Image (cartoon, rainbow, N blue to C red):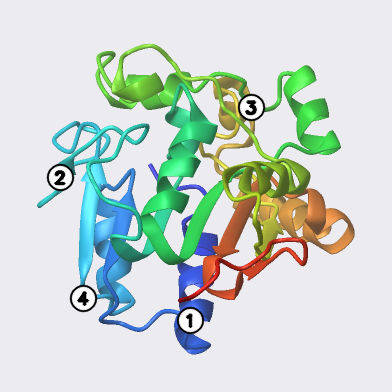
Amino acid sequence: MAEAGGGTYAAILTDLLDRGVITPTDPILVQFAGEFDEKTTAELGLVNCTFSNLAPDSPSSRLAEGHHADAHRMPYADGSFEHVIGHAGLHHCSRPHEALHEMYRIARSTVVAVENQDSPLMRTACALGLAGVYEHAAVADGGGTTGGVDGTGVPNFVYRWTRHEVRKTVATFDPGQVVPIEFHARWLIGSDRALTASVRAAIGGRERVIGLVNRGLNAVARRQGNIFGFTIRKDLATPHPWIVPEATS
């Protein structure tokens, strides 16, 4: 099954490489990693990656070389990696804010995440049964024993984010700093896990129609797109003006 948002994930990383925010040899922790992440980072020329997953050997991960770790309590010191990146993993966590905190804590320069967005249009789609609220397909891919919340066989609630929520969460983690955050959104509707099984069956094989729908939505309401990425720029953080610097001797 294609990775929803994979193109956005690669595009964000490519942009950061082009701008020199990330360099190919920077130490990077790839959180919630799977074979897709190994392939993507290799194609982008990122040569110093550590891949982490709660269940690195599971059918949904299939990591060739990965570390076992719980995203809520990572075994790394503060600032252990220059960058921490993660694709479509936070919504599998029982405590997504805590998992994002760990990504933030471990990173020195940037945190990159691609998830689903909580927007008025997406809430309407869920209410109409057009988009999933729980991710049953991921558990089905895992043979009924993995792929759900915290790597179990229980389908996870699809936790969707808003810009305001990300800003509040980061401000809570690091209240002494003004931390810039870059946001990315786009519509990508197709035969992926974002839709219910009945809707996938109804649109199956209608690539031209799906393409027209995506282009139309991106033209008029891109900001509300279901695919949602954000880059937290710790490297550009500045102290709040009311923070008094520590005295130096």
Q: How far apart are marks 1 and 4 (CA)?
A: 15 Å
Q: Earlier in the sequence, mark 3 or mark 2?
A: 2
Specify the amino acid type for callout 3.
Val
Which residue does the numbered mark 1 point to in the structure image?
21
| Alpha-carbon span between mark 3 and mark 2 | 36 Å
Determine the residue positioned at 65% across, 45% down: 189
Q: In this view, does 188 lie above or below 136?
A: below
Q: Are there few (<14), some (14-19), or many (20+) residues within 10 Å of tag 3?
A: some
Quarter of the picture holding the N terminus? top left
Q: How many marks?
A: 4
Residue 59 picture location, percent across and down? 21, 32
Q: Which dot, 4 or 3, sits closer to the camera?
A: 4
Residue named by callout 3: 199
- Determine contact: label 3, label 1, CB under 8 Å: no
* Foreground of the two, 31 or 107: 107
In the picture of the structure, the residue carrying the numbered disc 2 is 67
Q: Is mark 3 on a helix, strand or loop?
A: helix
| Upstream in sequence: badge 4 or badge 2 | 4
Q: Nearer the N terminus, badge 4 or badge 3?
A: 4
Q: Which amino acid, by three-letter code, is at mark 4?
A: Val
The residue depicted at 76 percent of the width and 34 percent of the height is 122
Marks 3 and 1 sit apart, C-alpha to C-alpha, by 40 Å
Residue occupying the point 18% across, 38% down? 56
> Alpha-carbon distance for marks 4 and 3?
40 Å
Question: What label sits on residue 47 in the rendered view?
Answer: 4
